[in-house]
Amino acid sequence: MIVCHCKGATDRDIRRAADGGGEALSAVGRTCGAGVSCGSCLETIREVLREHARGSETGRTPGKRPAA
Ligand code: FES
């Protein structure tokens, strides 16, 4: 899913940038450029980062159900 239309960055790009370390929002901007132009995607980026962090804490991939 495209999150940042200015840079064409996807939710996958954002999760990958967050995994690279550093402060997540800054890392996203540095790595894929998302959120650094018009800024209209910042809230969506934050939501992707929150979901990603929750998935990292539980070891689950957000949006995927555990195997039955
Ligand atoms: S849509 Fe992401 S900076 Fe403009």
Image (cartoon, helix red, strand yellow):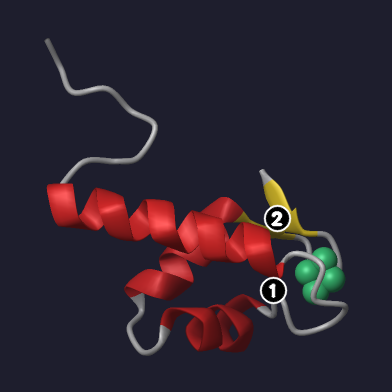
Q: Which mark is residue 34?
A: 1
Q: Position of residue 30 (x, y in %)?
A: 59, 89
Q: Is residue 13 left or right of residue 43?
A: left
Q: Residue at left 82%, top 67%?
A: 40
Q: Is residue 47 left or right of residue 65?
A: right
Q: Which mark is residue 50?
A: none
Q: Which SS class for mark 1?
A: loop
Q: Is mark 2 within 8 Å of ligand 1?
A: yes
Q: Within 10 angstroms of label 1, few (less than 14), some, or many (20 or more) residues?
A: many
- Looking at the picture, does residue 27 appear above or below residue 68? below
Q: Position of residue 54 (x, y in %)?
A: 28, 53
Kindly identify the amino acid type of the residue bearing the numbered disc 2: Val
Kindly identify the amino acid type of the residue bearing the numbered disc 1: Ala
| Closer to the camera in the image, 15 or 38 | 38
Q: Residue at left 35%, top 40%?
A: 62
**Earlier residue among tags 1 and 2:** 2
Tell me the CA gap for discs 1 and 2: 8 Å
Q: Is mark 1 within 8 Å of ligand 1?
A: yes
Ligand 1: quadrant of the figure: bottom right
Q: Position of residue 38 (x, y in %)?
A: 88, 78
Q: Which SS class for mark 2?
A: strand
Q: Are marks 1 and 2 in contact (CB under 8 Å)?
A: yes
Q: Position of residue 3 (x, y in %)?
A: 70, 55
Quarter-of-image position of residue 37: bottom right
Please give the residue where the numbered disc 2 appears in the rendered image: 3
Query: Split into 4 quadrants, where in the image is the C terminus?
Result: top left
